[in-house]
Image (cartoon, coloured by chain):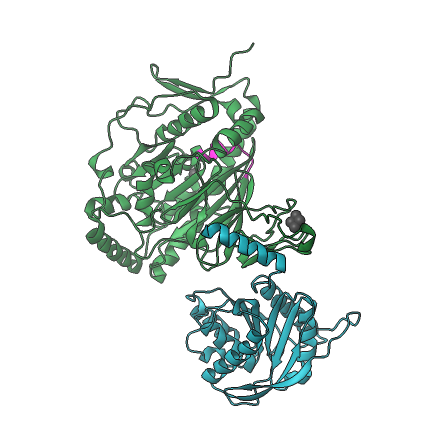
Chain colours: A green, B cyan
Amino acid sequence: MTAPIKYIDDDREAPRFRVNRSAMVDPDVFARERDRIFSKVWLYVGHETELKKPNDFKTRTVAGRPLIFARDKGGRIQVWINSCPHRGAMICREREGNARFMTCFYHGWSFNTSGQVVSIPGDTSYGADFERPGLTSPAHVDSYRGFVFISFNPDVEPLVDYLAEAKEFLDLVCDQSEVGMEVLEGTHEYSVKANWKLLVENSYDGYHAVSTHQRYFEMVVASGIELDAARLGDSIGVDLGNGHAASVGGPNTGGLFGRPLSEEALSEKSQRFDRFRTKYGEAWVDRMTGARNLVIFPNLVVIDLVMGVVIRKIDPIAPDYMEVTAWELVPPDEGPELKQQRLDNFLTFWGPGGLASPDDVEALETCQRSFASYRELPWSDVSRGMSSPVALGSDELQMRTWWRRWDLLVNGVEHEAEPHDPPGERFRGQRLELEAPAGTA
Amino acid sequence: MEFDVSVPRIEPVRSRAELRVGSVPTAEVRLFGLPRGAALLLCERGGLDTQAPELMNALAEHGYESLAVDLAELDLDDQGLLTAVHGLLGVLGEQGWSHDQIGVVGYGLGGRAALVAACDLVLGATVSLSPRAALEVDDPLVRSPWLAMFGEHDPDMPPAAVAELERRAAPAPEYAHLVVYPGVGADFFRASAGSLGHAAAFDSWQRVVEWLNIRVVPRPSPYAERWADRLQTSSAG
Ligand code: FES
Ligand SMILES: [Fe+2]
């Protein structure tokens, strides 16, 4: 009998943290992830503001399951499995739209957005007492400040508990609008020939920015921004519980990565933030002005570089292939100048045509190609910052936090959390208002 | 839209409706069996003779009974149009059709009436084709889903005006969708030999039917009614 494979080498003595690369290529690992992660935890499906009107819908895939994400006639958010209870055909084959009724094209059964079957062609053949099956929903659907999650696990813990300290980081993003943050129309969609976990790692990897995105930073410098190394380095890595983690910049690091704002936009922005200061208090707003890269376990990324908030959902398709969907979350109450510069910065950095995302894709795809040699070179090293009292944003605490959770769920191996000093005051300021934010589920 | 000769043709029954705003000529198509829904067709001027028979037959193919009317004979303001629509919905109501089982489809002045109705009433679906002076309707805050279609060369509604109307309809509680057909005028919905005209006529009719099919509440079959009753008693009990 062969010993079970060790996927994570978490050596606190050395200290050293390594990930076995077979985790990125092995179809059995992939199947276990489907079962033990994606069928068990909360998963992001979409944002409430994507569905503006009653009967608006979007079709999406989450954990391989085709879903209908809809607002019903009464305005409630609903999530349905996109499969006909009759004999299985996909009920809705549009990507998005507005419809009170969806008719299955196979035999013509028709359903409303509340999931009830409303007509069955030739229904007399079923007899008068036939139990008419409606649409099926995932075991749980819940939302936190507009972010809608589902779980296929009937016994999953409540969403607010699952989110743990990540809630606070969603609050820091959501508080940036007085009327509620809103997802813009249109999405970025791209695929990467690499294991999905590599993009999770990359999404809060502060270490790679300067080397991988050299071209981007040259452009930023050429546009007149002085890249202050001290401020760039002003960031920490934090473990938020349940596998969630973030790299978090100090005050005023959020705008560092974009082209400079115009005078007009700068003044509008400072006025907006002055209002926030009165409302939420200095300490909280200082935190709001920092950059943050957040990953909510397993596959939801929220990156807030203030110049633009990206929501990214990473979908594993095969061990060496993932699909990525990204949306931009904005404060709709911004003026046209600020909005224009935000959009411009966003598109320059992110997305399949941005100056940064393609670099990341290239980096991850070369990793995956080289993992063909995972037997000869089995380990990747993720130790950076393990021995530091405070983990920096450019360290690898975030990834280790994620991997430890992964090892627990997929392989049943428990790891202690990594001991570090608590982050400084600047990273802990709380919002003045004590009542729960609007929209809390 | 062209009429398919292989389908039997129904001759609409002509009559008049006595409304509070006056007497108007009507045409009616009733269906046997279990019709899917009802359509209220608000024709363009003179349309009861020219456009109604074709449209009513095409609606019947999709299971819709229809009541067509020409409101142009009366000189009505928006309030008058609304009163007229109320009266006509009452006629359909007497035949057992509830508001959410009715789609209102209007052309020209009728398109304006459909918009006014969409703002005031909760109906299954509403459609306006080249609605007359739609920009002058106060606030197009529709309470019924509203589809509006225009021709690019309609002097009454150039594309910029359509965009303005769309912007004003955005805060509405219900879904509104506006379409502009390129290279055609306000009569884009009439069959024409030119390729753009043909495409606009074909596509716009397709949209009317789809708009109704995914929104108008189907009349339940006796068994469906029984099922709904069972659901209600089980949720009440
Ligand atoms: S599979 Fe949907 S109606 Fe038969
Ligand atoms: Fe990157």
Determine the image quadrant of residue A232: top left
Q: In this view, does A72 lie to the left or right of A157?
A: right
| Quarter of the figure with the N terminus of chain A | top right
Determine the residue located farthest toward the right in the rendered image: B6
Determine the residue located farthest toward the top in the rendered image: A1
Does the magenta portion include A233?
no
Does the magenta portion include A196?
yes
Query: In the rendered structure, which segment of residues is drawn in magenta?
Result: A192-200
Q: Looking at the picture, how far across and down is residue A17, in whole percent? A: 39, 21
* Residue for point 34% across, 21% down: A416
Q: In this view, does A58 lie to the left or right of A205?
A: right
Q: Is A139 placed above or below A73 here? A: above
Q: Tell how many labels.
A: 0
Q: In which quarter of the image is ligand 2?
A: top left
Q: In this view, does A345 lie to the left or right of A363?
A: left
Which one is in front, A274 or B209?
A: B209
Q: Is A325 placed above or below B39 here? A: above
* Residue for point 46% across, 50% down: B237
Determine the image quadrant of residue B52: bottom right
Which one is in front, A269 or B29?
A: B29
Q: Can see residue B213?
A: yes
Q: Is A265 placed above or below A66 here? A: below
Which one is in front, A302 or B208?
A: B208
Q: Looking at the picture, how far across and down is residue A215, in whole percent? A: 43, 42
Q: Looking at the picture, how far across and down is residue A19, in whole percent? A: 45, 22
Determine the image quadrant of residue A388: top left
